[in-house]
Image (cartoon, rainbow, N blue to C red):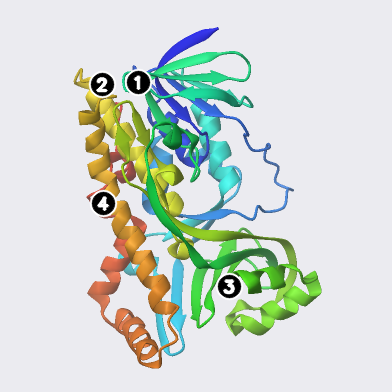
Amino acid sequence: MGSECDVLIVGGGMVGATLACALGQSRLRVVLLEDAPPDPFSVDQPFDLRVSALSVASANILKTIGAWDGITRRRLCPYRRMRVWEDLGDVEFISDEINQPVLGHIVENRVIQLAVLERGKDFENVEVIERVKTRSMTYGPKGSLVELDDGRTLKARLLVAADGGFSKVRQVAGMGVSGWDYEQQALVLTVETGCGQQDITWQHFTPDGPQALLPLPGAHASLVWYHTPEEVRRLKSLSNPQLLKALLEAFPACLGDIKSITARGSFPLRRQHALRYIKEGVALIGDAAHMIHPLAGQGVNIGLLDAAALAEVLLDAAHQGQDFGSEATLRRYERMRRNNNLIMMTLMDGFYRAFGNRSVPLRVLRNLGLGLAERIRPAKKIAMIQAMGLHRSLPRLAQGQALIG
């Protein structure tokens, strides 16, 4: 049995499902494919290892599409302070300094995905197909075909790749990437602390790599320990008591009293950028378009901005009677996002290389820079506004403006 749709989104993760919601209530017929949806949420479940630091702009997107309530009734942790330091250089950002209630929210990736998938099912023009894999995929400039394992065939004017860094859609459409692996990996630990609820996220730069704390609800936190692949493998091989001892010896004293390690995992770090985001009848969003160093936690945030920008372009084109799948239309999306994403990726590379350099003169300059950032208030305010996504050159959804009245 076959069916036709206007937009077929392959990948119902956080970014793909957000796009589906953003296109909800429109005249476009949307199908969202997610072959492995997350398990249902329960408040007594342990915290997931993979979490995201959602910016204010990302929260605006999720609120405007109606998915934020699905997050707040599960769990999230707002943070109001952010501290970055190395040796003597230290800067702390506080939301009160720019009259904002929070700098952002730490949320488990699974909670975000559950909320947007749940919201997507509310729209009559959106069909969410779950737990069915794709058997074959054929890209065509004027229409693509996807055959599912259950025998269904879907035909779409626009095929959207939201299927991750190793995107099958991107490969089928013949769209290349450039990239490389970083010389570090990330060891991620979920811990129970003796500090109670925290409202600060911090990052401490060391010669071996950054150490980060992301607060979670209650007396819990997510720790990220960047190190060489060999050292990450060694740390993962330790027993929990041995790993806890190594953690307390290596991390700064402000880590506080860690009572236990409740989960652990690791992942490699890779930079990757698609040479193009669009072709006639196809568009890339999220990790299918870019993979970024997680140093400042911007990966999900720029992916959600992709979804917001693409939805804006598609709905504007449809409203004006234009071909929403044409290369001319989709180029507007690419212009909105590719250069901005490249700037963010380059900035994260700069941090990675600058703070990973052991040169004594460079370390002095880094500390001087952090100290100046703390003392020069206008520059500090601009940095906070940019990080929170409060500037005006953003998709309308990120500014809290609905795309459909």
Q: Residue at x 44, y 31 (%)?
A: 172
Task: Give SS at disc 4.
Answer: helix
* Disc on the earlier residue, 4 or 2: 2
Nearer mark to the viewer, of 1 and 3: 3
Q: Quadrant of residue 147?
A: top right
Q: Which mark is residue 318?
A: 2
Q: Alpha carbon of mark 3 to alpha carbon of mark 2: how far?
A: 49 Å
Q: Nearer the viewer, mark 4 or mark 2?
A: 4
Q: Is residue 298 above or below residue 212?
A: above
Disc 4 versus disc 3: distance between alpha carbons? 30 Å
Q: Earlier in the sequence, mark 1 or mark 2?
A: 1
Q: Earlier in the sequence, mark 4 or mark 3?
A: 3
Please identify, in this view, whether the residue under mark 1 or under mark 4 is nearer the observer: 4
Within 10 Å of disc 2 (Cα), the crowding (few <14, some 14-19, many 20+) is some
In the picture of the structure, the residue carrying the numbered disc 3 is 228
Residue 17 place in picture, x, y as percent: 48, 34
